[in-house]
Image: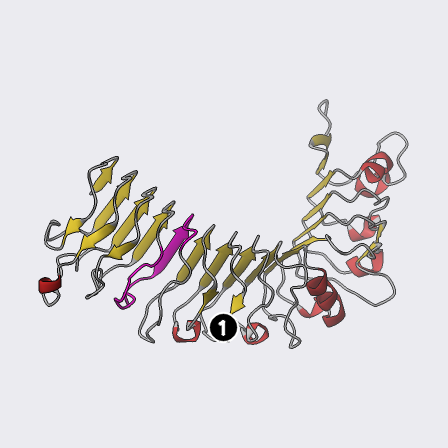
Amino acid sequence: MEIRGCRGLVSFAENNFPPNLKKLKIADCDNLEYLVDEKEDNKNMSCTLCLLKNLSIYKCPSLMSLSSKGHKNICNQLQLLQITGCSKLSCLFSNTKFPITLKCLIIKGCPELEYIVQEFKETACLEVILISRSGIKSLQGLDKLIHLQEIWLLSCSNLVSFEESGLLTTSFRVFAVANCENFGALPKCMASITSLRLLMVLNCSADISFPSEGFPANLTLLEISNAPKIYRSLVEWGLNRLTSLQVLVIGGEGCSNVVSFPEEGIGMMLPRSLTRITLLKFENLEFMFSEGFQDLASLQELEIFNCPMLTSLPEKDMLLSLGSLHICSCPLLKEKCSSDKGREWSKISHIPLVLIDGKKVIPRASD
């Protein structure tokens, strides 16, 4: 069932839903305050929403909570909950317990929402948490979510850190935090999460650092930007220890002292498993250190963006496996890669696809 643009809708009575309703979408209802208006004298009645599995609420700016009183679990079979663009939402379930059946929670554009729930139960089935552009301050009790697989925290300016050292589950695979400028500490247990495959830390507190224990060893994708302390820790710890890493994306904001990649003189090697490398915004990066690219027989893609001082690439022998090279906003390197006079041309002429500033250089239009 879908309800859209109903300005007269403020809430639903407890027993005013079809008994077999499983999916409900509500959108653009400006005056909706609660999904269910519970009555004091009905707090012991069975709930007619017990079969609801998917609930989506979009752009309802007056919504404050799902239940007016919070006496009962109004959605005790819920598996997917998505709430987007509800500027007054301050709590999800009021005094009710978190639905233990919920598998996916998506919250976007809810600036007044400071926490998900006061307490998770160990029987909770939650697998995915995605929170974006919301007022969330912390996440608590994650150690009880034994089925948790993914956490995405995007543009949450009030988020500071995790209050728990949980996430010690065998199924946890994705941790991504981006554009959370006050987020300054990754979970202490991060290094010991052997199931973690994707780790993204983008544009958070400039002082954010990684736990001293190191990096999750089984990562297949690592993306960091505007995190110079994490970058330095990564260099010192040894990138080559990430033996399963396939995709490496590094933004060099705050790394003004880095003139080579990998860094020359410290024995920094790249994992042999890499298939794609993306470097961006290294303001003083001058050259690519060829010895660090040894034995990258699986490397298929190399992308270099916004590195204005870069003048050279690794030696040709290190790039034989490449299927594509993309260079953008690197004016000195662009000049060196010119087919008629550039000294770097011989290094890239064998690559099937070369793009420079969005223009296809290889193959040429006439080829």
Image spot of residue 364 (x, y percent)? 73, 27
Work out which quarter of the rendered image holds the N terminus and state it: top left
Image spot of residue 199 (x, y percent)? 57, 61
Q: Residue at x 34, y 76 (%)?
A: 122
From the viewer's perspective, tell me whether residue 23 is left or right of residue 159: left
From the viewer's perspective, tell me whether residue 68 is left or right of residue 158: left
Image spot of residue 198 (x, y percent)? 55, 61
Q: Nearer the viewer, residue 58 or 348?
A: 58
Work out which quarter of the rendered image holds the C terminus and state it: top right
Q: Residue at x 13, y 63 (%)?
A: 40
Q: Which residue is mark 1?
A: 163
- Residue 327 lies in quadrant: top right
Q: Is residue 271 visible?
A: no
Question: In the rendered structure, which amino acid carries the disc numbered 1?
Answer: Glu
The residue range painted magenta reads 90-112
Q: Residue at x 33, y 61 (%)?
A: 103
- Residue 68 lies in quadrant: bottom left
